[in-house]
Amino acid sequence: MQNDKELTKSRKVYLDMEISVFNVPPCGDVLVLAKHAPVGPKAAQKMMDTICPELFELVEIDDDIVEALIVKRQLFLMADKQSIVNAVLEETKTFMAPQLMVKVDLDIKIMVSKSI
């Protein structure tokens, strides 16, 4: 039989942190809402309009998994709306779950080459 002095436990806690600037709004460039996400599309749009009026557009999706995207409007000035929607859906649908909300940071670069 062991006494209490012989029973020692060792515990180590490792903490990894990634520190970055807090973005307003905290949803990135696109918010992907699954069919049963905790926040519905209209409520999410209202939340975004409260934080940043007129900055985001609600794009409702006819799909079995994804219900809507909330997209930063300025992205549609840089690339075709349907192309952006299709690209985001193609990449996120592979891992979407019915209750998931996914933040997407989208970096569009326009490259121009001219001879004058």
Image: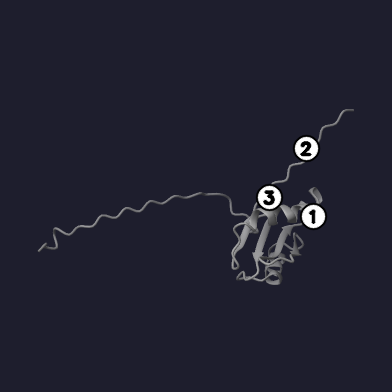
The quarter holding residue 2 reads bottom left
Badge 2 is on which residue?
A: 111
Badge 1 is on which residue?
A: 81
Indicate the quadrant containing the C terminus: top left, top right, bottom left or bottom right.
top right
Indicate the quadrant containing the N terminus: top left, top right, bottom left or bottom right.
bottom left
Q: Residue furthest left?
A: 1
Tell whether 2 sits left or right of 103. Answer: left
Cα–Cα gap, marks 1 and 2: 18 Å
Residue at 65% from the left image edge and 51% from the top image edge: 105
The quarter holding residue 28 reads bottom right
Q: Nearer the viewer, mark 1 or mark 2?
A: 1
Q: Earlier in the sequence, mark 1 or mark 2?
A: 1
Nearer to me, 82 or 105:
82
Cα–Cα gap, marks 1 and 3: 13 Å
Q: Which mark is residue 106?
A: 3
Nearer to me, 111 or 53:
111
Amino acid type assigned to the residue bearing label 1 in the image:
Lys
